[in-house]
Amino acid sequence: MTLRVAMIGYGFMGAAHSVGWRQAPHVFSLPDDIEMAVLVGRNAEAVADAAAQWGWAESATDWREVIARDDIDIVDIVTPGDSHAEIAIAALEAGKHVLCEKPLANTVEEAEAMADAAARAAARGVRSMVGFTYRRVPAVTFLRDLIAQGAVGRIAHVRAAYRQDWLVDPEMPLAWRLQKEHAGSGALGDIGAHIIDMTQFVTGLDVTAVSGVLDTIVKQRPLQGSGSGLSGTAADGVGEVTVDDVAIFTGRLSTGALVSFEATRFATGRKNDLSIEVSGDKGALRFDLEDLNTLWFYDRTAPETTQGFTRILVTEAQHPYVAAWWPAGHMLGYEHGFSHQVVDLVTAISEGADPHPSFAEGLSVQRVLAAVEESSQSDSGWVRVGAPVVAETSAG
Ligand code: SOE
């Protein structure tokens, strides 16, 4: 059987997803063939150029027309968050399997409607998945497996951070990711969503409560002329930044363990630094995206004289996904997670199973995002430090 894919959107994530759709069928033996059928975007000339560059057979400008086609089986949504709900619900109701980029939506209400539509569609054998791609970095999947096997014992504390610095330059234009009506939130939803999902994925525990603060450091920026992804050119005029640049929050897991979360676009020098460290009574595990083939493991059950963080190179054939690629030590990169995402989605579709992360899991992340925003607005949790006591000096 051939699964014909239509992708809605063609920016940075459109490029990354295109590499996944193109690479996966050649590297993995998929149960069904993939055809990159249609790329959809509003600007006819630009989307035609993108389709030619990334290997899509056709291009189109009307997503409603495309999802109504009988020869489309999967709809891949890589547009800004403000269009996820409308497109995903329409595609599911048209009987199309849906892959939707993260965060699932811009609001809990939208995410709830999407999760409901996904549940109804699943009853008809129509599948849906959210694009939390970092779950599919082999070291992250392996981290999850080791925790499930008890490698760190009872989890006491988790530290999760996602640090970038593409907004440190105040002249960086007002891209859609900086406008609440398009993105829903700033660092919180864009990169904070990743570390919330990753924490829940690797620990198998839900975040049940949060306390946090959001901050916008640069409040006005030049309007954007052209651009995509994390860069662009400035046009005349300035506009208000209506989302957060930094989100710092504490989470409590369903076992009571605490999580320290940090999502920032102002971590000067940190380019795409997602890190997570899980500490338990038997050991600890740490992953850093900027060294994504490595997993660090501290084993407290080892003899005390030989304890230390061990560097595991997650490139053995036994490690998740690796066997299809290269021999040990021949590293994978950022783009490989997008191929693994295609493999897992297509395999689930062919097996008649619901893929993960599901829209319901995307909704649980959306609820955490909303709780952080509520906490930040209510200023809850902050205790003002009393005026520092000025020590009496000999001079009196
Ligand atoms: C920008 O912060 C961004 O492109 C995110 O939107 C992606 O989800 C992340 O994978 C890389 O950085």
Image (spheres, rainbow, N blue to C red):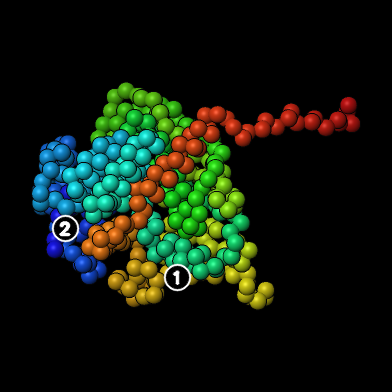
The residue type indicated by label 2 comes to Leu
Location of residue 286 in the rendering, given as x and y in whole percent from the top left corner: 52, 61
Query: Mark 2 sits on what residue?
Result: 3
- For marks 1 and 2, the one nearer the N-term is 2
Residue type beneath disc 1: Leu
Picture quadrant of residue 88: top left
* Residue placed furthest toward the top: 237
Check disc 1 and report the residue beneath it.
313
At horizontal 13% and vertical 61% (from top left) the residue drawn is 2
Viewer-side residue, 64 vs 175: 64
Indicate the quadrant containing the C terminus: top left, top right, bottom left or bottom right. top right
What is the x, y in percent for residue 275?
49, 54
Check if mark 1's residue and mark 2's residue have beta carbons within 8 Å.
Answer: no
Q: Quadrant of the N terminus?
A: bottom left
- Whether residue 285 is visible: yes
Residue 364 appears in which quarter of the rendering? top left
Relative depth, front residue between 332 and 115: 115
Q: Residue at 55% across / 29% down in the picture?
A: 378
Q: Can residue 339 be seen in this view?
A: no
Please tell me whether mark 1 or mark 2 is closer to you in this view.
Answer: 2
Query: Vertical placement of 173 versus 30: above or below?
Result: above
Mark on residue 228? none
In the image, is 184 to the left or to the right of 83? right
- Mark 1 element type: strand
Query: Badge 2, how many Cα within 10 Å: few under 14, some, many 20+?
Result: some
Quarter assignment of residue 327? bottom left
